[in-house]
Image (cartoon, rainbow, N blue to C red):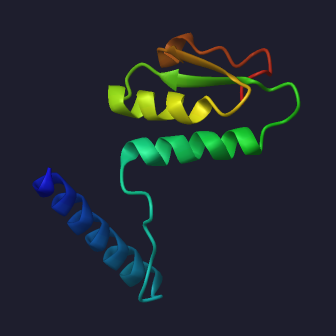
Amino acid sequence: QAEISQGRLEMLLNFQTMVGDLTGTGFANASLLDEATAAAEAMTMCINTSKKGQNKFYIGTDLHPHTIEVVLSRAEHYDCDMEICAPEKMDFSKGDVI
C-alpha cells in the first residue's frame, strides 16, 4: 500500500538524517527497506562467515510470518538446516549452529 511505503521511506530518511547528525558525517545509508530483507541479509552474512561443520540456522517463532517466509526463501540457495523454534528451545551446545 502506498501509505505504508511512504511511511517506510519517511522513516528511513529520518533515520539517515539522525545518524548523519550523530556521527557528524552529514550523511548515512539505510539500504534495507524492511525487517524481512534485513533478516535475510543477516542470515546470508552468518552463513557466508560460518565455520566448517556449522550447518544449522535457527529462526525464532516470535518473528513476523512474512519475515520467516523471506528468510526461508533465501535459505533455499544454501546447504543448511533451517529450524523454526522458540528461543528457549534453541540448542547452541553442539557447535553446529551458524
**Horizontal arrangement in the rendering, residue 92 relative to residue 28 (left or right):** right
**Horizontal arrangement in the rendering, residue 32 relative to residue 44 (left or right):** left
Residue at the far right in the pictured view: 52
| Closer to us: 86 or 4 | 4
Which quarter shows the C terminus? Answer: top right
Residue drawn at x 52%, y 41% as measured from the top left:
40
**Horizontal arrangement in the rendering, residue 3 relative to residue 37 (left or right):** left
| Closer to us: 92 or 39 | 39
Image-quadrant location for residue 83: top right
Q: Is residue 64 visible?
A: no
The percent position of residue 29, horizontal first and vertical second, equals 46, 73
The percent position of residue 33, horizontal first and vertical second, equals 37, 56
Q: Is residue 82 visible?
A: yes
20 lies above or below 30: below
39 lies above or below 66: below
The percent position of residue 80, horizontal first and vertical second, equals 71, 24
Residue drawn at x 49%, y 41% as measured from the top left:
39
Image-quadrant location for residue 16: bottom left
Residue at the far left in the pictured view: 3
| Closer to us: 84 or 94 | 84
Residue at the far top in the pictured view: 89
Image-quadrant location for residue 89: top right
Residue drawn at x 25%, y 65% as measured from the top left:
9
Residue drawn at x 32%, y 68% as measured from the top left:
15
The percent position of residue 85, horizontal first and vertical second, equals 50, 14
Q: What is the tally of numbered marks visible in this picture? A: 0
